[in-house]
Each structure stands twice: as structure tokens, then as C-alpha cells.
Amino acid sequence: MPLQLIFSKGGDVNILYCSTHACELGGVKFPVHIQHLVMINDIMRRRNGPSAMCVALWLFIALFVLQFVNYDWNIFNFHFFNDGEPHMEFRGPIKPFTDKYNIGPPPVAKNLPYSTLKPRPWEMKGDTSNDYIHPPRVTEVHLRIMVITYNRAESMLRLLNSLNKVDYLDDRVVLEIWVDRSKDGVIDKKTFGTARNFSFEKGFKTVHQQDKHVGIYGQWIDTWQPTADSKEIAVIFEDDITVSPFFYRYLKNVHARYDHRPEVNGYSLQGISIKHGGAGGNLHAPDDHVVFLYPIVGSWGFSPKKENWIGFQRWGKQIACGLCGTFTMHIVKKNGHFIPNFPHNAGMTINWKEKGLHFAKTLKNTDPLVMEWDPRLDNLPEEPVHLDANGKIVKY
């Protein structure tokens, strides 16, 4: 039976309607069990006047209601406030795999609270909850996407939206967004809030805060920490990148074809690459080679080879910080990196060349993005062409 309580004071009448599972007061509905209201009503009817117990009971009811009707009062952290689809939901069919990336059944789809709630202002100043600094790590995936960012929310969102348009071949994917702090230890509110509110439609998403300022070097080197037995592919993107819908298909092919080669450090996704020695200008490999090996990494989207990456991380921890410089100067020792060689210097990524660490001012972007699959990538050459730092062919 529905319950109706009428409260009158000073000529004002308030009516609380309650059904079996919910109540409504002033047009606001909230969940509460009807037996609780019956108990409170009986207590109040047996007393004359608003005793201290009655006042306390109604204050508790008001606080309870605010947990559901006003997010800023949700001090008990009830999770009823999704902005849309769950950010940690795994979607799409899972097809069986028989290649080396077959790593067992898919992980259980679930929502994690830190990825579904709107950010409160005080959660983005100084130290924050460990849920955001060190969220649970999603394991057993085929592809781990590392997005590193600091304070360019619009650029990051453009990249994230392009990641939602990628063909992941029904593989299991996790998107990790890493937000660096300023030298004063502050997280950029807009960037962090944008990362939390973004809905990744193709897999899992986690948002990480660095617990201190680590800079571009720390963001690049320390975010992906593979184990020796890991079978996942990882790719690292800075926030001013846009990706091709086919970048994962390309990465899966080149990893499968060339990971056995000891001289390979990883795989770059950019199409346009400059020479790092001799005369200036862009690199040009023979047109009949769809990929080529080059000793300098292209950082506009980079997928490390696990074994060499682990060795590089160990080496990086041994050098003095004063020697760090730029990422490019450290990733290169003596091995090479694969770069795609498409017509018109098209790439699996493009860089918008926005003002930041790499560019003093925003430049006009004219680089083409691969929007159609090249069938040659399904039959990669066993022996790729090698270019030296000057862009000259040293092995054909």
C-alpha cells in the first residue's frame, strides 16, 4: 500500500508520497524502503512536538536524499551518476585466435567507479585518491594504448575520438590515459576531467595521474612496463596526434612479421620523417618497399618491441638525469625502427604540430592520413630496406 505523509507548519503543507521502493517529495524521487517511513511516522505520532530524536531522523533523511539528487553532496560516494555509457565496458564479439596473441578468455566486463563519475574540483588539486593515481591494471589484452598528456584537453579529445574509429579486429583493447602534473604538483582540471568523461567504445579505459611531475621523458619511458612473458602489443601516443582507422591492423602485421629480428626496436606510425644526418629534408625509401628500417625513432605514434624496450628501460635508469635531453636522443642506440612508406608520405598517424614542447608555435598541418588499407601490408617483405641516418640505402 502506498504511504502518504502530510506535514504542516505555518500554513505550508508538504506531502511525502511513498510506494514500495521509492518516495517523492516536491517532485524529486529517491529510493527508500516504505517500512522505514512507516517506522519514522509511528515514532513521530507517539510524540508531541519535534523532539531531538525526530529532528535527527529527518536530518538523516534529508542527507540521504541529497546523495541521489545532488552530486556535490554525495559524500558516501554512491555510484548513480553515469554521464552515458560505462567507460569500462567491453563491447563487441570476441573471435577465437590461434596465433601467438591468443592469450585466453576475455576479461570480465565491468565498470570502475573512478572512470564513470564526474570530477569534483577538489579531486584535481594536489594529491588525489589513489584510485586515480594507481587504478587497477587491466590485464590479458591484445593491445594497450598509452595516451600521454599534460594540459591540452582539446587536442587529447581529438585523439581519443579518432581512437574510437579504429578497426581493432575484435581484439581485446585497453586505453590508458596518463596525465602528468605541473612542476608544482597540480593536475590540469580540464584535461583530467575530459579524460575521465570520455567514453571509449572499443574496450576498457583507465585514467592515471602521475604522482609527481615526470615530464615528457617519464611519460614516454615509464608508462608501459611489460613483463618478460607479456604477449600484448603496446603503442604510445602524445596528445596532438590523430590516428588512422587501420593503425592497429598495420601494427599487428609488422609485429608478427619482424619481432623475431634482434635489430628491430619498434615500429613508428608516422608517414613523414626527416633526415637526422647529412643534408636536410624528408626520408625517401624506394617506392616498391611499403616499410623501411631507419635508426632514428619516429615519435608520432610508436609501438616498442617488448624485449628491446625492457632493456632500454633498464639502461635509462642507469644514466644521469642531466643526460636525458629529448626522447629521440635516448631511444636510439644502434638498432632500428620500422617506418611505413606510403605514397605521398601518408601515415598511420598525423601530428597537428601544436604549440608545446616540440613546436614553439602551432603550424599548419598538411600531412595525409591513411584512410584505405594497402594490400601490400598483408604480404610484408622478409628483408626490408635499411636506411642510415642520412637517408641513404645501406641494405636493399
Image (spheres, rainbow, N blue to C red):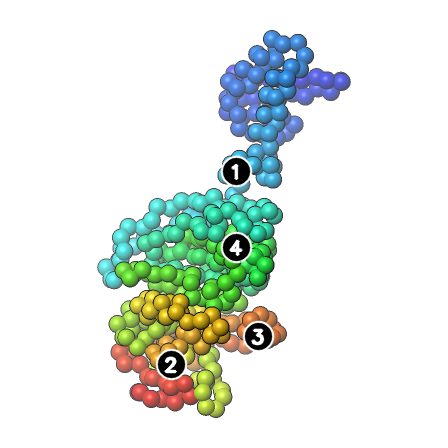
**CB under 8 Å between callouts 3 and 1?**
no
Quadrant of the frame with the C terminus: bottom left
Three-letter amino acid code at the position of disc 2: Tyr
Secondary-structure class at tag 1: loop
In x, y percent, where is residue 383? 27, 81
**Does the CB distance between marks 2 and 4 fall below 8 Å?**
no
> Could you tell me the amino acid type at mark 3?
Phe
Residue at the limit of the structure toward the left, as seen here: 98
Amino acid marked by disc 4: Ala
Quote the CA–CA distance across marks 3 and 4.
24 Å
Residue drawn at x 47%, y 68% is 217
For label 3, the crowd category at 10 Å Cα-Cα, with few meaning under 14, some 14 to 19 and many 20 or more, is few
- Badge 3 marks a residue whose secondary structure is loop
Query: Badge 1 local density, few (<14 within 10 Å), some, or many (20+)?
Result: some
* Between marks 3 and 4 in the image, the one whose residue lies nearer the viewer: 3
The CA distance from mark 2 to mark 4 is 34 Å
Precedes in sequence: disc 3 or disc 1:
1
Looking at the image, is mark 1 or mark 4 earlier in the sequence?
A: 1
Q: Which residue is mark 2?
A: 294
Q: Amino acid at mark 1?
A: Asn
- Residue at 40 percent across and 65 percent down: it is 235
Say above or below: 337 vs 20.
below
Picture layout, residue 26 above or below residue 315? above
Q: Which residue is mark 4?
A: 195
Q: Residue at x 32, y 54 (%)?
A: 140
Q: Residue furthest bottom?
A: 279
Q: Disc 3 marks which residue? A: 359
Element type at marker 2? strand
Give me the residue at 38% from left, 81% from top: 294
Residue 179 percent location from the top left of the image: 51, 58
Q: Earlier in the sequence, mark 2 or mark 4?
A: 4
Corner quadrant of residue 12? top right
